[in-house]
Amino acid sequence: MELNKNLNMNIYNFKDIDKWIVGNSWINSEIVNLNEKLGIDIGSRWATSQNERNAAKYIHEFWKNEGLQTYHENFDIETYKFINSTLEVEGKQLDVKPYHRCPSVDLDSDMIDLGHGTYREVSEKSENIKDKIALIYRNHEPFTEQEPISNRVAFISNMGASAIIVGDPKSGRRMEYSSVWDTRDPESVYPPLPIVNTSSEHLLLLKRYAQKNHKAKLKVTTEFYNAETSNVVAEIPGEIKGEYIVMCGHHDTVFDTPGGNDNTSGAIAVIETARTVKKAIDEFKLKPIIGLRFITLSAEEQRLQGSFFHVNNNYDSKNKPKYVLNCDELSTGNLKGIVLGFSHLRNFLQGQLDTLNEDLKVHVMSQIDGHSDHFPFLEAGIDASHPWRWRFFGRYPSCEYHHEPPDTFDKLNVKDLKYYISTFSRLLIRLSLIPIEQWPKNPLTKEIVRTRLDEEKNFEIRTG
Ligand SMILES: [Zn+2]
């Protein structure tokens, strides 16, 4: 690793390039303008909606005006909209927000309190669940091995429940749009029964009502359909055709929020890093060996359909990008490093990060992470990663806003984002200049990864 680090550093004067990039990222930043356009003027961007289409057009135009080669990658997705949703007990209207792909339902039924919905709790009450609305916490049961929510709801559904009301972990009647899909398990794509969210406070109220044998009226009307959306791609070609490094982040949001943290922050990181890298390459007349592909992906919030489309449509086992960096939710304090899905790039990437002199560290996930757009790449055996950052809401309150209306433009931290953009620009330029033969080989196949996923899908470790 020492060798290629030094080789690279000898050929190019990174001192001047870095100085230029850092200065430019801070002084000529478009972050505030992009945030105003995406987070305020356009607003929420549910994939396939008019707003989301407008955002994709805007990003395409923006890149075109910067002289980047840019195009839309169009495709149809399975989408839906909630026409209405109501929850009523004893004449009182309670908080309700349907889960991802919740089918239409119209019930007036008894409820049953199933605690956290663990295997133990559900088994104990198995005789009593049929045709009832089950009440569970989203949280895991304390001191107990974590059972994925997809497993918990599948078991409750098998016991014959008619619907599930899940209590949101947040307090203050905040509710997130949520899903029970475990990305790693293709069986869990569609929810097995109607599932809705309620606030933490109203779940406690419902549990009291359940004890008194009050009935709940739960109504959701959902319309399912297919519609067109697009990823937006900008490319800086390299000397070797067909070799790419990818940076991506989704531009869509859930239906009722402009997504300041999730993910105007990450989309802007992609848009601005592309702009900065392009300008630096022109300024210093650099000739990338490996091409750079910047993508704002659509439909991340609708089971990663944009990322899945991109991966299936562009890559196969013989033609994989060398490295992928996915940015999702960057309003999380400053950057600590990079988290890789697989281990073989670890020392190589650490060697490059060390040349930035920012004390950034590379880590490797002990489980394949299914929580964002890096997953479809990982599933295809591609070296994908995401930024390692401080996700402590005590120190960085913006980081706990995602799928709810208050994830607004003010949740985007401009100064932090400038640092992300300058750092990613410095890293990606370095990587694009490293000859192909100096990259560690990637031995992974889809089959190897699938075997790992099947082993891992029934439990969850998430650290960092
Ligand atoms: Zn996101």
Image (spheres, grey):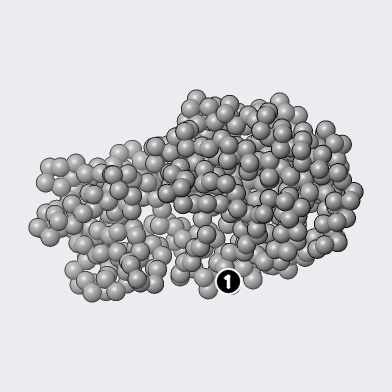
| Dot 1 amino acid type | Arg
In the picture, residue 362 is in which quadrant?
bottom right
- The percent position of residue 389, horizontal first and vertical second, equals 56, 52
**Residue farthest to the right, as pictured:** 11
- The percent position of residue 415, horizontal first and vertical second, equals 58, 37
Residue 285 visible in the shown view:
yes
Q: Closest to the observer: 1 or 16?
A: 16
| Mark 1 residue element | helix
In the picture, residue 58 is in which quadrant?
top right
| Category of crowding for the residue at label 1, using alpha-carbon neighbours closer than 10 angstroms: few (below 14), some (14–19), many (at least 20) | some
- The percent position of residue 201, horizontal first and vertical second, equals 23, 49
What residue sits 11% from the left and 46% below the top?
A: 90
Decide: is 437 above or below 50: below
For this view, does 434 lie left or right of residue 458? right
**Residue farthest to the left, as pictured:** 212
In the picture, residue 144 is in which quadrant?
bottom left
For this view, does 396 lie left or right of residue 428? left
What residue sits 85% from the left and 36% below the top?
A: 284
Residue 70 visible in the shown view:
no
What residue sits 58% from the left and 72% below the top?
A: 451
What residue sits 18% from the left and 45% below the top?
A: 88
- The residue indicated by pointer 1 is 452
- The percent position of residue 233, horizontal first and vertical second, equals 68, 39
Q: Closest to the observer: 195 or 39?
A: 39
Q: Quadrant of the N terminus?
A: bottom right
